[in-house]
Image (spheres, grey):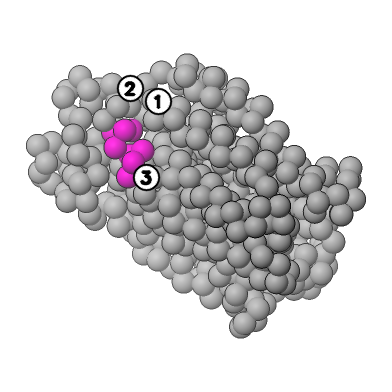
Amino acid sequence: MIKKEIVITSLGNTIEWFDFGLFIFMAPIIGAKFFPHTSAVNATIQALMVFAGGFLCRPLGGIFFGYFGDTRGRAKTLRISILIITISTFLVGVLPSYDEIGFAAPILFIFLRLIQGISIGGEYSGIMIYLAESAPTKKRGFITSFAAIGANLGFLLAALTLMVLNLIFVKEEIISWAWRLPFILIGLPGSLFIYYRFKLAETRVYSNLQKKHLIEPMPFIAAIKFAPLQLLKILGLTCMGSTFYYVFFGFMPTYLEHYIGFAPQSALTIESIMLIAMLITVPLAGMCGDYFTRKKMLIITSIAIILLVFPCFYLIQSKSILLVVLALGIATILSSLEQGNTLALVVENCPLNVRYSGIAFTYNLGNALFGGSMPLIVSLMTEKIGIISPCYYLIFMASITLITSFTLLSNNQSLRALRHLTPLSMQKNSQ
């Protein structure tokens, strides 16, 4: 695969996660801007509920974009998704606040988040598929890991952007208007990604499906009807990764600031260091999966998360910077191992000609149910139960993924295309 294609495809994903990072990190400010003024905690909860609502639209977007991805091509679908994400993110930055237009503000804000959720339903899963299908078989894990690199880069840029805002502007200016700048400025690189997306070639896997007349006219229905077990496996794979990542690398700056007592700059600095490290460790984890098999790597990772999540949280409660860095360093390695292997596993365990529809719906459903709700769940559990309570939820989710891992294809194999809508055609090969 051409290196430029990897960069172009994976970096489009960066906009999506840059927006996610900004939204989570600035939830208290955004909540206060677009919702009726009650209390800071309620404003944050309301903003996180909208965040979760956007995630709930991702499965719907998965059905919509999955249809076009399986019937019209992977590359064409990725062009549409990046266009919608860029425009909707920009509009959040220019949207009038509640003080300016009243209840129209939360309505328009929620609408934009739902539109973003729908478009993201085709973006991240489409990138996973495009990279996996374009990669050589022996480098599939490494190449596919670039989708996760784009996501981590987005979170990193969001953290760095907030650090820059805090250096340039005083707190009152950020709350008043400067928080809008990152959302507005993202339109510039977004336009560049849109331009290059139109230069992407179609994957060889999809081209072969066309030549062999294996394109499914109703791919989502075919996936539900003839590959339900495969879809359940994909759902199981999302449990651990979505919850663990959003706790340790999405909500953690807010957690460190509001519950542990760290200064905002310190929390963002630690977060940035871990995300920079992840840009290196995720592709290394993908290479390990290519060599040792992804199934083995995910089983080991699931067990490690179950055993280590409690110690990590206890280290964080110490309020010592060194111990917090140690805890998040362990979490970085564990999350990297998960990201570097899960994405390729998801693609390999879905039949070729219903792959976009099956993955876009099921993977997004898992992320909507488990990932999108995670910041809200962590906030509520911490407030109502205790500061360590999120550990129990993470262990439960990791256990589901561990059980699922034992049912996956071995030796980095892939499923064939569905043929004539019969489950007998779903046989293994080394595609």
Q: Which residue is mark 2?
A: 204
To which quarter of the image does residue 89 belong? top right
Q: Which residue is mark 1?
A: 75
* Distance CA(mark 1)–CA(mark 2): 11 Å
The answer to whether 427 appears left or right of 27 in the picture is: left
Question: Can residue 64 be found in the magenta stretch?
Answer: yes
Identity of the residue drawn at 53% across and 37% down: 85
Mark 2 Cα shell of 10 Å, populated few (<14), some (14-19), many (≥20): few
Question: Can residue 321 be found in the magenta stretch?
Answer: no
User: Residue 189 got which mark?
Assistant: none
Tell me, yes or no, whether the two marked residues, 3 and 2, touch with CB atoms within 8 Å: no
User: Residue 62 got which mark?
Assistant: 3
Residue 419 rendering spot, x and y as whole percentages: 13, 36
Asked whether the viewer can see residue 140, the reply is no
Position above or below: 370 against 218: below
Tell me, yes or no, whether the two marked residues, 1 and 2, touch with CB atoms within 8 Å: no
Position above or below: 316 against 237: below
The answer to whether 152 appears left or right of 2 in the picture is: right
Q: Looking at the image, tell me whether mark 1 or mark 2 is earlier in sequence order.
A: 1
Identity of the residue drawn at 51% across and 50% down: 111
Identity of the residue drawn at 30% across and 42% down: 357
